[in-house]
């Protein structure tokens, strides 16, 4: 009887240890957030929040309109690259001032936050001279632009089918300029366009062309 009780207690203890370990792992998962607020222009603000698992949300808000929130999932490689940028920037080092003292034009107030679960820091800047934080800014800018482009292509497929070729041209230019963080995010909508025989031949041909390009990019990553 005592032996059974001892075994039971050991089992309960192991479950508690496992629960504590899992809880520690969850709380230590990094989180990233970035937002840009514009004092002028049609787009009032946009930003992104990402977890260490690659899942998150992108949000856009036009002036005098409701904000739009989009779900996003990135591959582990993209999250690892982002985390390595924050490490290279030594972002959590409170003694580092990332805000440039130079007087420059209003480029929009950017807010970036990095939380490892053990440490966190937030920085607000209009302009930074730190090269790595510039890379981080470009990553988030490109990600937001990418998700807005994906949203607009989806919207065109539903409500403005004649406007699809223009949206695909924009996508191809952004791919060429390497302003797309996760090209695979476009695969599903491009497949829909290519397989839709009711669409004009030009749109379907362009969709197939970009699909092939994305497949090659995945096979031979830069």
Image: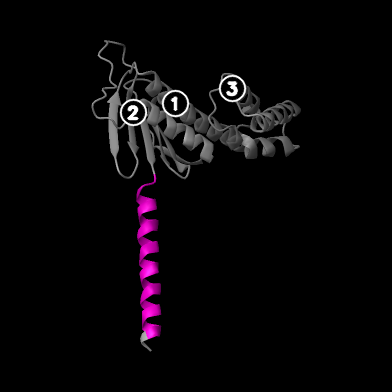
Q: Residue 109 shows which numbered tag?
A: none
Instruction: Judge by depth and name the residue closer to the eye, 182 or 5.
Output: 5
Q: Depth check: 27 or 6 in front? A: 6
The tag earlier along the polypeptide, 3 or 2, is: 2
- Label 1: element kind: helix
What is the CA distance from the residue labelled 3 to the residue labelled 2?
35 Å
Q: Residue furthest bottom?
A: 1
Residue shown at 23%/26% (left/top)?
Answer: 95
**96 versus 185 height, above or below:** above
Magenta stretch in the rendered image: 3-29
Q: Residue at x 33, y 18 (%)?
A: 128
Q: Which one is closest to the eye, mark 2 or mark 1?
A: 2
Q: Which residue matches tag 1?
A: 141
Quadrant holding the N terminus:
bottom left
Is residue 126 shown left or right of residue 163?
Answer: left
The furthest residue to the front: 3
Q: Which residue is mark 2?
A: 90
How packed mark 1 is, by other alpha carbons closer than 10 Å (few <14, some 14-19, many 20 or more), is many
**Direction from residue 114 to residue 214 in the image, left or right:** right
Picture residue at 70% right of the left edge, 26% below the top: 206
């Amino acid at each position: 009887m005592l032996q059974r009780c001892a075994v039971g207690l050991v089992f309960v203890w192991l479950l508690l240890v496992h629960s504590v370990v899992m809880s520690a792992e969850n709380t230590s998962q990094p989180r990233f957030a970035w937002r840009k607020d514009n004092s002028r222009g049609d787009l009032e603000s946009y930003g992104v929040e990402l977890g260490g698992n690659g899942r998150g949300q992108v949000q856009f808000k036009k002036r005098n309109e409701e904000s739009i929130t989009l779900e996003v999932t990135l591959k582990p490689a993209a999250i690892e690259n982002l985390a390595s940028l924050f490490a290279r920037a030594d972002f959590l080092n409170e003694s580092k001032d990332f805000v440039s003292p130079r007087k420059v034009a209003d480029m929009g107030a950017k807010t970036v936050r990095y939380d490892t679960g053990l440490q966190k820091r937030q920085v607000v800047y209009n302009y930074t001279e730190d090269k790595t934080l510039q890379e981080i800014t470009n990553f988030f800018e490109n990600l937001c632009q990418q998700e807005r482009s994906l949203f607009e292509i989806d919207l065109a497929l539903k409500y403005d089918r004649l406007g699809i070729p223009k949206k695909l041209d924009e996508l191809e230019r952004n791919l060429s300029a390497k302003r797309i963080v996760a090209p695979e995010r476009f695969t599903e909508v491009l497949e829909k366009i290519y397989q839709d025989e009711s669409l004009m031949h030009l749109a379907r041909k362009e969709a197939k062309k970009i699909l092939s390009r994305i497949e090659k990019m995945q096979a031979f990553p830069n």
